[in-house]
Image: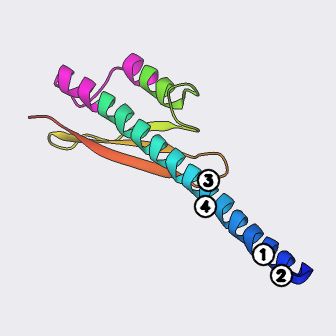
Amino acid sequence: MSLIEVLTAVLIFSIGLIALVGLQTRAVRYSMSAEDTNRAALLANEVVSRMQLKRSLTLSDTELSALQTRVASASEGLPSGQLTIGEPTAKTAPVTITWTPPGGTENRYTTSAVLP
């Protein structure tokens, strides 16, 4: 095998490795995004569950403050997380959680609390 053939084989192998590293990086980014979305859904579900237990579409200032702190918490919340509860209409109220991962764009998860 000549030196040119060996160098060509090494070049092709290197390009393949670079492609695999890029693929792994993208997979980790999507995995983190899915984890954040899942966490947002769980936090929003907690807000809706509290509203349904109280049979009210509004929360006290203390409850709302505690939930907003939890959403923004570094340990169990979301990066730059914010909780917003919209104005209730009839028997529904929108619950929105927004967050921005480091170096990313703003993400939003919205659900509605519905009282029977």
Residue 65 rendering spot, x and y as whole percentages: 45, 22
Amino acid type, callout 4: Leu
CA distance separating discs 4 and 2 = 27 Å
Q: Is residue 1 above or below residue 26?
A: below
Q: CA distance from mark 2 to mark 3?
A: 43 Å
Q: Residue at x 58, y 38 (%)?
A: 79
Q: Does the magenta stretch mainly form a helix, a strand or a loop?
A: helix
Are the residues tagged 2 and 1 within 8 Å (C-beta)?
A: yes
Q: Which mark is residue 68?
A: none
Q: Which mark is residue 104?
A: 3
Mark 1 or 4: in front is 1
Task: Name the one closer to the observer, 84 or 103.
Answer: 103
Looking at the image, tell me whether mark 2 or mark 3 is earlier in sequence order: 2
Cα distance between the residues tagged 3 and 1: 37 Å
Query: Is 105 inside the magenta-drawn segment?
Result: no
Callout 2 secondary element: helix
Q: Nearer the viewer, mark 3 or mark 1?
A: 1
Which residue is depicted at the point 44% across and 50% down? 108
Mark 3 and mark 1 lie on one chain; the one further toward the N terminus is 1
What residue appears at the point 65 percent right and 46 percent down from the top-left corner? 102
Secondary structure at badge 1 equals helix
Residues drawn in magenta: 48-65
Q: Quadrant of the N terminus?
A: bottom right
